[in-house]
Amino acid sequence: MTLLAVTNLSVRYGKNIALQNMNLSLSAREIVTIVGPNGSGKTTLFKAIIGSTPLSSGKVELKPDIKIGYVPQQLNIDASLPITVERFFKLAQKIDDDSYEKALEIMSSKELLNSQMSSLSGGELQRVLLSRALIDKPDLLLLDEATRGLDQPGAAAFYRKIESIRNDTGCAILMISHDLHVVMGASDRVICLNGHICCQGAPDSVASSPEYKALFGSDVDGTFALYKHNHDHSHHSESKPL
């Protein structure tokens, strides 16, 4: 089932073309990652999908009655407006015991419930935002550089959580990331963006493409070697006899 179809999308800010001729579709249960340099239109694409920026041309079609969860790149919380994590969760439109318990499980720390949102560390805040986005049981989860500010082990743990969320809930995930080495292992498909789609496909085919190397420089060979090592290692370590 197609959840999202973007056709011939272009977005301009004045004379500046942020995106042009974008074509993209996303199916149920897919994990698709968008990579690209700063200013390549990644966040603009998300804004176009959720309807917060006007389109210059083309269209964005969403499955009727689709529910979208969104984890922004950062959330600036005013320390002078106190709000606890528990209160933040209970602002969800529809919250039942089951979805609330699942959210706590993903957050993996009930102790945070009484914490002030403004006092959370980067990693804690990302876990809270991810958990909160899942309370409304979205069909599609949008993650805009959700691992910004996390160290490599923290980012790797976050992506493992993303995969388990897809497996548990069946939601599709579209994420923007700069963690090239980690993202490869967690994605069904990678889209390389620089104002338009430079290349897309399975992680290994994108990582070896000339367009990808042109954007990210010579260090991508090392990145991909690390991905293959981690990916192969994780498959061996997780394989269990039937």
Image (spheres, rainbow, N blue to C red):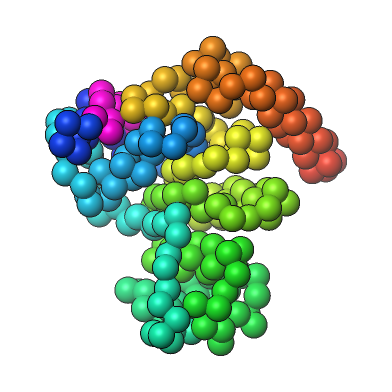
Q: Magenta span: helix, strand or loop, mainly?
A: strand
Name of the residue lying farthest toward the front: 15
* Residue ID at (44%, 37%): 38
Residue at 56% over, 87% down: 114
Q: Nearer the viewer, residue 129 or 106?
A: 129
Closer-to-camera residue (10/230): 10
Give the residue displayed 54% in from the left and 62% down from the top. 126
Task: Examine the rendered structure and indicate whether residue 58 appears above or below residue 110.
Answer: above
Q: Is residue 192 above or below residue 55?
A: above
Picture coordinates of residue 184 (x, y %)? Answer: 61, 33
Magenta-colored span: 17-25
Quarter in which the C terminus is drawn: top right
Question: Which residue occupies 51% across, 53% down?
Answer: 146
Q: Is residue 19 magenta?
A: yes
| Residue 197 located within the stretch drawn in magenta | no
Q: Position of residue 206 (x, y in %)?
A: 55, 21
The image quarter containing residue 203 is: top right
**Which percent across, then down, holds residue 64?**
23, 49
Q: In the picture provided, is 51 more to the left or to the right than 147?
A: left
